Amino acid sequence: MIELSTFTWISIFALSAMLVNAAGIWFVYRHQQWAKQSKEYFMCFAAGILIASPLIIAFPQAIAQNTHAGLAALAGFIYMFFSNKLIKYKTKQNELAFGITALQGIGIHSFIDGIIYSVTFSASTAVGLLAGVGLVVHEFAEGIITYSFLIKGGVSARKAFIFAMLVASLTTPLGAFIAYPIMINISKSLLGLLLGFVVGVLIYVSSSHLLPEARVNEKHHSYLAFITGVAFSLLLLLINK
């Protein structure tokens, strides 16, 4: 194994995640007509990922680090529920509220991804590599999904591109570099609560936004996109083993 410092490994993976995510956003931005025609498939694919990944990957890790992670997950779900209500009330636009609420979930998730790089590589290089590969693999799809959320929310293509870059791409290295200097003060118990909160956030986004939307605008074989999202999460689980 290549001998690199912990900070170097964290930087490599955090910046790789940012670039892969940005590539997904750029791809869908450059192929907008195709993306518009395929957005229901993206929604179903995203629903599969955001239901399966938290339940089979993040939540077991959260429980292992803090037995109260379930309460944190409930708090994340409730937070998103009332946040969505507040956004709808302020904007008076259901479509825009959809995009903003989903963007919150992705932003929190991406920021925590960055923290996870710092946590895992601080524990050991091997653990960091296992977790890092799985996280980077899903970034391309996450970039596409984030952009699609914003377009669905009525945001213009140019603004969706910029906001997706800021919220989905840049938050991962931001989380990593903020977390690294204070890693000695972050306990596994606290990380477990953070992961639990993210689980609740992502399950809310999937169950309350993506699945209902996919059901209303269901296309032929769109259920296969949902199953593909679940299968993708199972692949990540195998990579992280």
Image: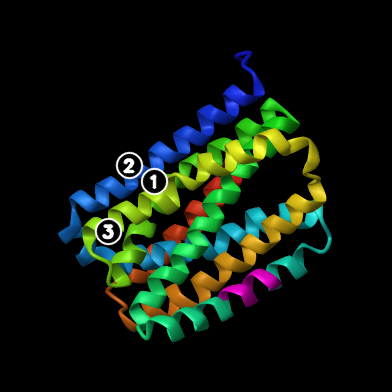
Q: Please state, as top left, top right, bottom left or bottom right, where the C terminus lies in the image.
A: top right
Name the disc covering residue 159, or none: 3
Q: Amino acid at mark 2?
A: Ala
Q: Any magenta on residue 77?
A: yes
Q: Amino acid at mark 3?
A: Lys
Residue under label 1, please give it. 140
* Mark 1: secondary structure: helix
Q: Which residues are magenta?
A: 75-80
Q: Amino acid at mark 1?
A: Phe
Q: Position of residue 89 (x, y in %)?
A: 45, 86
Residue 240 visible to an observer of this rendering: no
Q: How far is mark 1 from mark 3, CA to CA?
A: 19 Å
> Principal SS element in the magenta part?
helix
Residue under label 2, please give it. 23
Name the disc covering residue 148, or none: none
In the visual, does 168 lie left or right of 132?
A: left
In the visual, does 131 lie left or right of 29?
A: right
**Disc 3 packing (10 Å; few <14; some 14–19; many ≥20):** few
For the point 78% across and 52% down, the residue is: 190
Compared with 64, 94 (above or below) is: below
Q: Any magenta on residue 63?
A: no
Dot 1 or dot 2: first in sequence order is: 2
Q: How far is mark 1 from mark 2, CA to CA?
A: 6 Å
* Mark 2: secondary structure: helix
Residue 234 visible to an observer of this rendering: yes
Front tag of 1 and 3 = 3
Q: Position of residue 148 (x, y in %)?
A: 32, 62
Dot 2 or dot 3: first in sequence order is: 2
Q: Quadrant of residue 44?
A: bottom left
